[in-house]
Amino acid sequence: MYRSHVLVCGGTGCTSSGSQQIIDTLKREIKAAGLENEIEVVKTGCFGLCALGPIMIVYPEGTFYSMVQEKDIPEIVSEHLVKGRIVSRLVYDETVTENGIKSLQDTAFYSKQNRVALRNCGVISPENIEEYIGTGGYEALGKVLTEMTPDEVIQTILDSGLRGRGGGGFPTGMKWKLARNIVPNADQKYVCCNADEGDPGAFMDRSVLEGDPHVVLEAMAIAGYAIGANQGYIYVRAEYPIAVKRLEIAINQAREYGMLGKDIFGTGFDFDIGLRLGAGAFVCGEETALMTSIEGNRGEPRPRPPFPAEKGLFGKPTILNNVETYANIPRIILNGAEWFSSMGTEKSKGTKVFALGGKIKNTGLVEIPMGTTLRTVIEEIGGGIPNGKKFKAAQTGGPSGGCIPAEHYDIPIDYDNLISIGSMMGSGGLIVMDEDNCMVDIAKFFLAFTVDESCGKCTPCRIGTKRLYEMLDKITKGQGTLEDLDKIEELCYYIKNNSLCGLGQTAPNPVLSTLRYFRDEYIAHVVDKTCPAGVCKDLLKYSIDPDKCRGCTLCARKCPASAISGTVKQPHVIDQDKCVKCGACMETCKFGAISKN
Amino acid sequence: MKSLEELKAIKDKMQSTIDLRHEDPAATKVIVAMGTCGIASGAREVLNAFAEAVAENGITKNVMVSQSGCIGLCENEPVAEVISPGKDKVTYGHLTPQKAKEIVQKHLIGGTVVDEYRI
């Protein structure tokens, strides 16, 4: 019996800023204070507010400490844990009010969220199956096995309106129904989990696996019962070592407790799960490539149809769902389809997890009801854009998606709205850009990623994206022509229409959407040979305003290329031939005499 | 292999652990003062007795046992406050683990303030 729990985030973000050392020190200090039988230290998954890591919450008070350092631990133990005095200098400032500390749930970051898929992340220890069971874990599996027929399970998922959270948005219940019925009397079927999250800036699935691995296992077993499969595979990337380790622990514990294996709950239903590690190829997130990789072959896609529901893994009927999709399943079974479909918009039900990144104050993980506006997500939950800069666009769907410009700031986020404005939901990466981001450069960045990750099997993707990249590169160097813009557009549609798999079919999206909303920036690069955001180095020119320059020589001393010359107390000049455009001079100047254009 | 009954038993066993991590604004708060004065006169034992009695009686969902610093009533330590939403705060003094268990039974479960321990 512990009177108090200290929860420390053990997600990847906080771990990289030292949360494991904090846990070790905390345990040592608690022991030294003789409190080891009164206070339990729990390593949890991600709390979501990654920008403020390492994060620690002390219950029952719910005190939220942010940016905790190892050296703060003795103070927290002796003041808070021993004497009940909150260490106010470490408390998350949003929770501090005139009348004391308010609940975390009332802060701007959390109050607009609705955590379904993330409900246990940051609440339980992912390495202890009993904590998961304590929150109602494996109850849904018990319910479907003892009270529901497979058809009833599928009907519940269909009625809930749940759509695939991996990006495509295909109705999950429909997928299950097809896999159950399309091949009568199939001797073997499979349930797969796509945990090959690879978009730059996306970490939703990783956080679910790290924070609540059992929810995925339970949901896969439910899916197995629904479609008539007794074997599952989780395909997770080897670059997620914490997620892999916790999955391994979870699978072993689930077997030990009889939640996986033979004759689950004495109902005669068998189900087991194997883990398969991906080597980090982006294309393996595409379902057919993923299955090919599980089979032991080189991860390359194949044409559909046949769809996996008919002929999937090892040629058998297979369903493949994303981690976040699975994370919703047990709650839908327990709370009912109506509960789930009461959240969200007409065609997009439930909630969606987004990984907020880029130019935003609260970098982290948020789960919002579908239909929340981009403005709410960025301004209220995300805390807005730092340094008083102006919102320019947000990229959703990573390299497969597109940008949402300021004119669509108030659009309710759901699958269909995002498609209609030329972006897509994607798996949930949301990268915020401000006025300092060059949209041509952004398009080039994402395209460089897809060029790198194209598997090379089909020509439109392998060569098309490469040529597209070269043209963008030309534009950012100031050598583009207006004709190139037309060519780019034509090539984009060619690649979209002719590529074999989703990777190629969506690769031009960042280019197309930036061309659609920020054509003037492309034209500025091509016609005026300038980069309005001041990012593309070849188009930049730093100059010193002689009226403002006091001749302090600071810039000349800072310049790594010795491109600035002048005598003391006289205006300095930049030698454009030597300048490497690093911007160091501009940052150093105290008089605002240096400008770039 | 676990049966559904065994699953339920684990859930019940873990209930107090999970409840501790949920902030419920409607919960009654028992706050034990843990200044140096309180600790010296045995507040820690009292705090633990409260926490254990609340868990043993299965009322963790409705009662939160927490601590504060010195509240300035040093001569009455160990001191605990019981704060129920919508009711007047009740302050108990000169507590012992035994008295704490009695307060849990009579006040938190039974709803009757234990007047003899009030200060």
Image (cartoon, coloured by chain):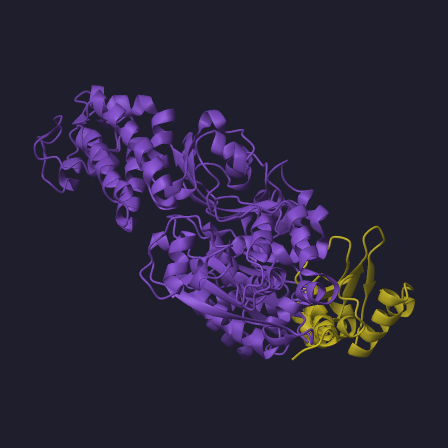
Chain colours: A purple, B yellow
In percent of the image, x 21 and y 22: which residue is there? A483
Q: Quadrant of the N terminus of chain A?
A: bottom right
Instruction: Look at the picture and state if A522 lies above or below A217.
Output: above
Instruction: Look at the picture and state if A473 lies above or below A313.
Output: above
Instruction: Using residue B47 as the reference point, say whether residue A175 is left or right of it.
Output: left
Q: Position of residue A393 (x, y in %)?
A: 41, 32
Q: Nearer the viewer, residue A174 or B46?
A: A174
Q: Nearer the viewer, residue A446 or A10?
A: A446
Q: Position of residue A287 (x, y in %)?
A: 43, 53
Q: Position of residue A223 (x, y in %)?
A: 59, 60
Going by the picture, which residue comes out furthest to the front? A184
Instruction: Using residue A400 as the reference point, say whether residue A190 is left or right of it.
Output: right
Instruction: Using residue A62 as the reference point, say whether residue A430 is left or right of it.
Output: left
In percent of the image, x 34 and y 40: which residue is there? A507
The answer to whether residue A324 is seen in the rendering is yes
Q: Position of residue A248 (x, y in %)?
A: 48, 72
In percent of the image, x 37 and y 25: which residue is there? A516
Instruction: Look at the picture and state if A309 lies above or below B77.
Output: above
Q: Nearer the viewer, residue B62 or A504?
A: A504
Total numbered labels = 0
The answer to whether residue A17 is seen in the rendering is no
Instruction: Look at the picture and state if B57 lies above or below A285.
Output: below
Residue B90 placement: quadrant:
bottom right
Q: Quadrant of the C terminus of chain A?
A: top left
